[in-house]
Amino acid sequence: MANTIKYIFSLCVCIMIMASGPVQARLDVDGIEHALLHRVNTLRAFYLSVEATYTASGEFVDKEGNVIPLSQMPFSLSLSEELSAAARSHARDMIDRVYYDVDTPSGITPAERAVEFGYQPVFVEESLGAVAFFGMIAPESAADMIFDEISFHVAGLFSSNCTRIEAEPILNPYVTQLGVGLQGGVIVIDGEYFNVYVLVLDFGCPVPEDNDSRIVWGHIFNDVNGNGLYDRNEGMAGLMVKLAGDLIPAFSPAPAPRFGVSTDGAGFYLMKVPPGDYMLSVTAGEQILEQYPVDLLNNRVIQNDMAFAPQVERPGVEW
């Protein structure tokens, strides 16, 4: 692990010696959080919105040419202090214990950390970025540099700077809140000292506050390694997940409530529905792959992951 980190950071040193600038005595936490919120929402609006155009002046306009405030764009996030506290804590822990992962060495996940800070999640996903250097740079500059690399990563471009990035969750359309944690410090690897900034972005989908909504979510995946758990790159895209409610009352002319969503590239799905008992089914074309009841009357949130054996071919399914 140490050799890997040292190699990554060694790539940074040559660039950062020349790019070093004045040190800033303290982090402007509020300013950095709001600046990154603006950049995250701009990136999400650019890639996820189909109802507006991004102009050269940095504004989004609708088909009639009206400017849409970024906060009113679909998929815009709001800041969560609980998520930010969890993000800051994780960034500090990675520096103090010299590791780089969304999970801690003891296996604590982003969602579990968020709960420790008072957040009630359906799920939490995390993006990481880090930069190491000799000399000094302002934290705002480090945050911008790391987020530039996240933008390059999302765009599918090769990055040229010295950051290490995990950026996948940033375009998840189901998250609604953001936590930002930027921490700086010094690490020692094999007797060598490196200045470092670590940026953690926590993306959260909170449990609904009202009692009129229920959520079922999860991953449908091709269990390549046979561990029964969803791992990156195992998701099965393009499957239809459906919920069919009970016919209550039986004499009602209204049809049973039905909901459906297609799994994304990571095999992820989420549905927000009224309380009730439902039959959940997973289909590929006309073929039903799985079907069973789910109780969304007594449970506000159900995580429902489904694993399929990789050796079984199923028509209409992307592997």
Image (cartoon, grey):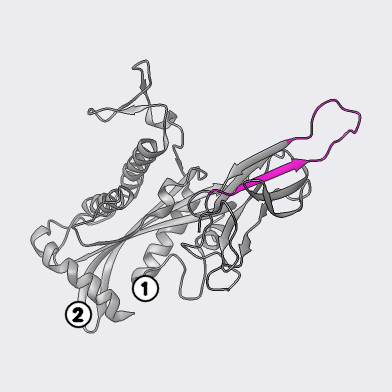
Q: Position of residue 11 (x, y in %)?
A: 18, 69
What is the CA distance from the residue labelled 2 to the residue labelled 1? 16 Å
Query: Horizontal placement of 89 versus 272: left or right?
Result: left
Q: Position of residue 7 (x, y in %)?
A: 23, 75
For residue 103, above or below residue 246:
below
Circle count: 2
Q: Is residue 71 magenta?
A: no
Pick the front one: 52 or 111? 52
At 46% across and 32% down in the image, what residue appears?
74
Q: Position of residue 174 (x, y in %)?
A: 52, 44
Query: Horizontal placement of 304 versus 76: left or right?
Result: right
Q: Is residue 119 visible?
A: no
For residue 148, above or below residue 68:
below
Q: Which mark is residue 99?
A: 1
- The type of residue carrying mark 2 is Glu
- The type of residue carrying mark 1 is Tyr
Pick the front one: 249 or 221? 221
Q: Position of residue 254 (x, y in %)?
A: 81, 27
Query: In which quarter of the view is residue 208 placed?
Result: top right
At 48% across and 43% down in the image, what residue appears?
173
Q: Residue furthest right?
A: 251
Residues in magenta, as a range? 238-257
For residue 301, above or below residue 228:
above
Q: Residue furthest bottom?
A: 190
Q: Residue furthest top?
A: 64
- Label 2 with label 1: CB-CB less than 8 Å: no
Q: Considering only order in the chain, which callout, 1 or 2, is on the residue closer to the N terminus?
A: 1
Which secondary structure lies at badge 1? loop
Q: Residues within 10 Å of mark 1 (few under 14, many from 20)?
A: some
Residue at mark 2 = 192
